[in-house]
Amino acid sequence: MAGAGGGGNDVQWCFSQVKGAIDDDVAEADIISTVEFNHSGELLATGDKGGRVVIFQQELESKNQPQCRGEYNVYSTFQSHEPEFDYLKSLEIEEKINKIRWLPQKNAAQFLLSTNDKTIKLWKISERDKRPEGYNLKEEDGRYRDPTTVTTLRVPVFHPMDLMVEASPRRVFANAHTYHINSISVNSDCETYLSADDLRINLWNLEITDRSFNIVDIKPANMEELTEVITAAEFHPNQCNTFVYSSSKGTIRLCDMRASALCDQHSKLFEEPEDPSNRSFFSEIISSISDVKFSHSGRYMMTRDYLTVKIWDLNMESRPVETYQVHEYLRSKLCSLYENDCIFDKFECCWNGNDSVVMTGSYNNFFRMFDRGYRQDVTLEASRESSKPRSVLKPRKVCTGGKRKKDEISVDSLDFNKKILHTAWHPQDNIIAVATTNNLYIFQDRLTSIQ
Amino acid sequence: MGQRDIVSYETSVRRKSRIRTASTMCRVDVECAVKGPEQHGNAIPSSRYMVGRGVKRKLSDCEDQMLDLPYPQQRQLVLDLCLDKLQSCQRRAEPSLHRSVLLANTLRQIQREMRQEGGPHPESSPPAPATPRHSPDLPPVPSDRPSTPVAALSSSLLCDDAQSTCTELPKGPGSEDGGKSPDLMFGSFEITNSTSYLTDLQLDDIFEDIDTSMYDPSDFSVLACPPPRGSSGASLGNDYNLKAFSTCTTSSSTLQMCLNDLDHIMEILVRS
C-alpha cells in the first residue's frame, strides 16, 4: 500500500522501534513534551514532563542488514530541569521541558538548549572512552601517595574504557521571562538564539547568561487590553537577521533585526482573510497558531492551527500557498472539543529533509503526512498493535458520515486522550519520530534492496 | 549509561501522579463531578451536559443538537462554558495566559453580539456575527469596552441593567454604550456596591463553599497601578498586573471578586 513520502508516492512506512513503558498506566512525569533530531540525524532527543532529557543515538548500519538503517538506542539520560517554587506569586514552576533545540556540531561534543517555562539551559554532551592510568602521585583509586615513597617516574598512559556519556550544564539563562516560554530557536550565526514567551521575545548570546535583549514586546500598557499572545517563534534558517513569530489570532509576523532594536513593527504580516461561511464562536480559538516552522530552504514556512496546516511563501503575505486539512471532521464537534479542552491542544508540525512532505499529529494516535508535490496525504497510526518489527503501516481512514466502511473508524470512536502533539523528521532520511503520550515511536521507510 | 534500550522509565520517575484525563468534565455538569473521571472512556466524553437548569443531553449528541438549537441558545451554551472555564482558570495549577486570552476574547465577542442585539431577545440574528475578526494591528485597543476575563462577565450585561449600581471607571476608553460604563476592572472595583448582592443571592451548589467574609479590597489597589511599560533590555518579572492572567493566586480575595461577579451575572441571567 502506498503512502505519502518524500521523493515519490511509493514510500511505505514501517515500524522500527518504540520507546517507553508498555503499560497503559501513564505516569505524568513520563509524558513526552518535545522531540527533536540533531542536525545530522544521528541523535534524537526527547524531553518529558518530569524535566528529563533522553537522547537516543543511531547505531551505525550493520553490514549484515543493509536493508535496515541503524536503530536508535539510549545514549544519555539526564535531569535537565527541576521544579521550582516562585515565592512571590505562590506558584510552582513546572519542570516540564517545553522545547529542545540542538546546536550545530562544532567539535567532538554535542550541545543542546532545553527550556521549561522560565529557564533555558545549555547542555554539553560529551563522550569519554579513555582514561589515563599510571599516575605517579596518585594511586589507582585516587588517593594521593606519599611523595617520599616515589622512587621511579612513569608517564601516564591512556587506556580504553567503557564508553561514558556525560551531560553537563554549561550555561543557565534565567530570569528573563515573566511569562511562560513557548519557543527557543538557534540563529544561523550559531552565536545567538531567541526565546519567546506569551508576550515577549528575547535575544541571547550563547556565551552570556546575565543579559538578554528584548526584541519583541506585545504587552499592552494595560493588561486588561490584552487580546493576543505570542504562540511560537523561529529564526530563519539562513538569514541571521530574520525571524518570525505567530500569534493566537492566526497571524504571523516576520521581523528584521536590522530595522530596529525593538522589532515591534513587523516587516511582513501574514494573515489569511477569514472564510465567513466557516465562522463560529470558536473561530478565533481554532485560528490560534500552535507551531511555525521554516522550510529547510528558507523560502517557505508552515503554520499549524487546530484544523489545518498552511504553507506560506515568504514573498506573499495575503494568503498561504497551500492549505491542508488535518481533521476537518472535527469542525462540527468544536463545541464538545471546547468543553473537554481539546480545542486548546497545541499540535506541532515538521518538514521532511527536502521540504517535499510535511507531517503533523492528530487524535487517536493518528498522524498525517501531506506530500506537497504529489498532492497526496496519508493517515497513519502509532499503536502497539501495529508494532511488529518492520511491519508496514496500514493507512487509516476516518469515516465522516454515512455508511462506515470496513477498517474505517467513525469520528465518535476516536480517542481524544490519545493525541500526537510532537513529531520529528530526520534531516536527511525517511525516518520519523512520533510521540504518543508516553511512548516514542520510530518509523522508517522500507528501503528497496539495492541490486 | 550504556547502549541498551530502556523499556520502562519507572525507576527514574520523580512524580507518579495519575495523568489527568483530557476529558476533564465541564464543571457545569455537577452530576459528572460526582461520578468522577472514570466514566470517560475513549470517545468524546458521553457525560451529560446541563444547559440552563435541569436540561440534560448526551454530549456525544451535543454537536448535532447544538446545531439544531436556535442561535441565541447556542450562544448561551458557549457563554456558560466560557464563564465556567474562566472561573476554573483561577484554580488551575498551571495557569495559561494563552488560554485565558482566548476565553476572554470568546466571551467578549459573545457579549458584544448580545449587546448589539440589545438584550436577550431570540431574534433572527445572523448566524455569522459581523464582528471584526482582528483589532487594528496596534497595541491591542479593541473598539469596544476593554475588559478582563472577569470584568467582561459584568460589563455589557450590567450596563443594560437599569438597576446597576456599579461605578463608572475614572480611567479607560469610553465604551460604545456611552453613558454608564460599569466595567468592573480589577483596579477600581467598588466593594461597597456589590456586597449587597452577596447577601441577596441564593448561592448555587458550585459556590456554596465560598467564604465571603474575608473580602479584602486592598489587593486591588496594587492591580490598579500598571507598572511602567518594560523597556528594552533584560526584562525581569515584577509585574503586578500579571496577577490578572498568569497567576493562580490562592488569595481568596481575588477569587472572591471573580465569583462575586459570577454570582451577579447568574442572578441577572436567571431573572431575565
Image (tube, coloured by chain):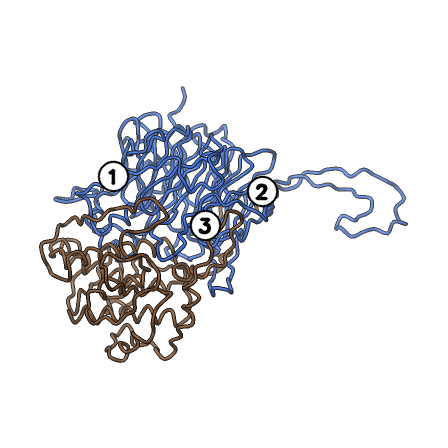
The disc placed on residue A273 is 1
The disc placed on residue A215 is none
Q: Nearer the viewer, residue A157 or B199?
A: B199
The residue indicated by pointer 2 is A125
Name which quarter of the figure residue B195 lies in.
bottom left
Which amino acid lies under the numbered mark 1 shown in the image of this protein? Pro
Name which quarter of the figure residue B242 lies in.
bottom left
Image colour for chain A is blue
Q: Nearer the viewer, residue B177 or A444?
A: B177
The disc placed on residue A181 is 3
Residue A348: image location, x then y, percent: 37, 43
Q: Secondary structure at mark 1?
A: loop
Q: Which chain is brown?
A: B
Q: Earlier in the sequence, mark 3 or mark 1?
A: 3
Q: Are marks 3 and 2 on the same chain?
A: yes
Query: From the viewer's perspective, is A37 left or right of B84?
Result: right
Task: Mark 2: give few (<14), some (14-19) or many (20+) Cα within 10 Å.
Answer: some
Quadrant in which the C terminus of chain B appears? bottom left
CB under 8 Å between callouts 3 and 1?
no
Which amino acid lies under the numbered mark 2 shown in the image of this protein? Ile
Residue A304: image location, x then y, percent: 33, 41
Q: Chain of mark 2?
A: A
Q: Chain of mark 1?
A: A
Q: Which residue is drawn at the image coordinates 11% and 56% (left, top)? A: B70
